Image (cartoon, grey):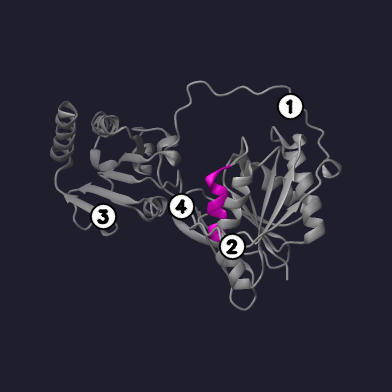
Amino acid sequence: MADVWTIAEVSGGVLKEISLELLGRARTLADTLGVRLASVALTSHLNEDQVERLAASGADVIYLGQDSTLEPFTVSAHASALMALVAEHSPQIILAGATTYGRTLLPYLAVKLSCGLTADCTDLAIEEGSGNLLQIRPAIGGNIMATIKSPNHRPQMATIRPRSTPLPSLDYSRTCTVCHVPITAAVHNPTHVLGLRPFVGQQRSIEDAEIVVAGGKGLKKRDNFALVEDLASLLGAEVGASRDAVDRGWATYPHQVGLSGKTISPELYIAIGISGAIQHLAGIKTAKRIVAINNDRDANIMAIADYAIIGDLFAIVPLLAKRLQERRKTQ
């Protein structure tokens, strides 16, 4: 039967975490279908220990294409290499991250292969009986969860939100077949990169933060959002916000946490004045520790919080900040 594929992302010979997240997600799909799970890595080079990480994360097969024509990334080069692989092996499912790479590559590939694509999925499943891929994602501004399937076209393709699933456990005893893919003859690349220029002053994304302190409409006005910013500064954290806070102009969209913003998985998430709409909770479900500060003991977020502090945030947050400042002075 046709295999399940994930598309790995590589930077400087090292895998990005989304590559392993995808394998963790896809392992269940492949096992349900009774087929192999493959990871496709197209890059100028991939370090040997990183190949072993793909195998240990669940890949049964690794299609490894290494060639200088694949870096820097251009959609035409990567898509033409993938199209040649798809024509040879006919996978039934292809998954990539909902990242700049995946969001650029898979739509182009879907058009070339005349198949469907569901973007920004937060969950996947196999339909009983048909074996179709059920692609679950937020719709209508995140107010409903839509389930989409492509029964008439193969491969079935989807991009998956980063941080929407935990990293798989590594098992270095697994066996895996590495297939080295010849690239140059397969690549048609009319795009020539003249140069690359990094963004200046770009802040770290909240998706990569170890600690996120976020504020919601319980803060009542923009001036009060400074409580969130000050606490984040003391903790060395990034600032997050609920959709309500962003809609009110208290924070900008890159700080928005939830299905309509960023899906995050920090070691610590502190929610201040956030009630916890379903879209917001889905965006933090893989956080390691959740602390909620809210005067409503029945707020949705209290049900999933590891630590729920019920009370007036305008008294609690300044007290937390004061204690942190005092602790700094004694260190």
Query: Which span of residues is magenta-colored?
Result: 15-25
* Element on which disc 2 rests: loop
Label 3 amino acid?
Asp
Label 4 amino acid?
Gly
Of marks 3 and 4, the one in the foreground: 3
Mark found first going from the N terminus, 2 or 4: 4
Residue wearing tag 2 = 174
Of marks 1 and 2, the one in the foreground: 2
For the residues labelled 1 and 4, the Cα–Cα distance comes to: 37 Å
Residue wearing tag 1 = 193
Is residue 64 something that shows in the picture?
yes
Please, which residue is most extreme toward the right here?
185
For the residues labelled 1 and 3, the Cα–Cα distance comes to: 48 Å
Question: In the drawing, does residue 191 fall left or right of residue 11?
Answer: right
- Mark 1 Cα-neighbour bin, 10 Å: few <14, some 14–19, many ≥20: few
Mark found first going from the N terminus, 2 or 3: 2
Q: Position of residue 97 (x, y in %)?
A: 58, 48
Mark found first going from the N terminus, 1 or 2: 2
Which residue appears at 28% of the width and 42% of the height? 217
Mark found first going from the N terminus, 1 or 3: 1
Residue wearing tag 3 = 306
Question: In the drawing, does residue 67 fall left or right of residue 59?
Answer: right
For the residues labelled 2 and 4, the Cα–Cα distance comes to: 39 Å
